[in-house]
Image (cartoon, rainbow, N blue to C red):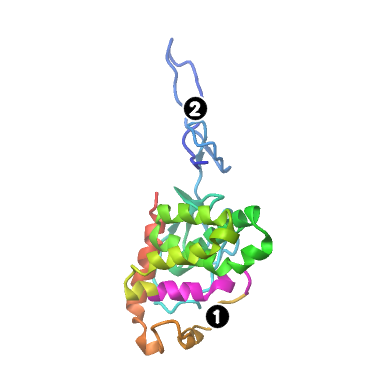
Amino acid sequence: MKANWGWETKASQSKPGKHQIKKERTPIITSRGDRRDPEYMIGLLDRGCSKARAISIRDSDRWLDTYKTPCGGLGVPYIDDLGRITGHLIHKWACDPKTLVASCISTVASRLLRYARRHNKRKLVGAHSKAILGAASYYIFSQNHHFHDRILFFLRDLSKRGTLIHRLRLFFSSKMDDDKRFVYSQTCFQVNWLLFQGTKPRDKSMFYNVERTIWKSPGDAPNRTIVTNIIREIAYTVSRIC
């Protein structure tokens, strides 16, 4: 099912044998995917907004150490029921770039988990929730639709293909440079918070005690300027996806 807002047409007799097209706007999201759909009115969200339609807002800024950056308003993409970025915007939001990134990841992850629960037992889905969050994070970082389609296929039978989610994500994310992989790893470290299983992000200092990472201390991590630029690049790419 493809989401589209298109134009609604109304025939009015302006001249004999001809019709005039009238454009209309609506606050209702429709998903027929043809030109009968009216154009959706993009809403404006306040900076401190905690709840909005079609987006799972994660507004804490404690999960990543970046500089405060001015923002006149970022576009919030419409993410469909399968967790796919559709190419349309649903809101304009004056928020920090990392808030948009975290919210989009949380939204995609919640859609994938819901899809997985329709095809698998809840306990099995819970066992693979961390891998699903990792896949959602990589999808927002890369907007790789082929990767997302493969994840959807794996989610249909987690008992047989559940382990492939992590392996596929690892294959793609290993191609990132070290700086971007650091930001990605920090994102995956917040799995409980992003999946609404925790009220706050985990303490960032604990990240450096994880032996599987190559960043053994804060001094090994990229500096704040590099991290800020990476998260801004991802946020603005998602914001301009249409």
What percent of the width, then of the height, locates residue 228? Answer: 37, 73
Q: Is residue 140 magenta?
A: no
Q: Is residue 65 visible?
A: yes
Relative vertical location of residue 88 with respect to residue 35 in this rendering, above or below: below
Q: Looking at the picture, which amino acid does disc 1 mark?
A: Arg
**Residue drawn at 40 percent across, 56 percent down:** 144
Q: Are marks 2 and 1 in contact (CB under 8 Å)?
A: no
Relative vertical location of residue 16 with respect to residue 99 in this rendering, above or below: above
The residue labelled by disc 2 is 9
Q: Identify the element where label 2 is drawn.
A: loop
**Residue drawn at 54 percent across, 59 percent down:** 161
What percent of the width, then of the height, locates residue 213? Answer: 42, 82
Q: Earlier in the sequence, mark 2 or mark 1?
A: 2
Q: Is residue 176 left or right of residue 153?
A: left
The range drawn in magenta is 182-198
Q: Which mark is residue 52?
A: none
The residue labelled by disc 1 is 202
Q: Is residue 107 visible?
A: no
Relative vertical location of residue 112 with respect to residue 11 in this rendering, above or below: below
Magenta stretch secondary structure, dominant: helix
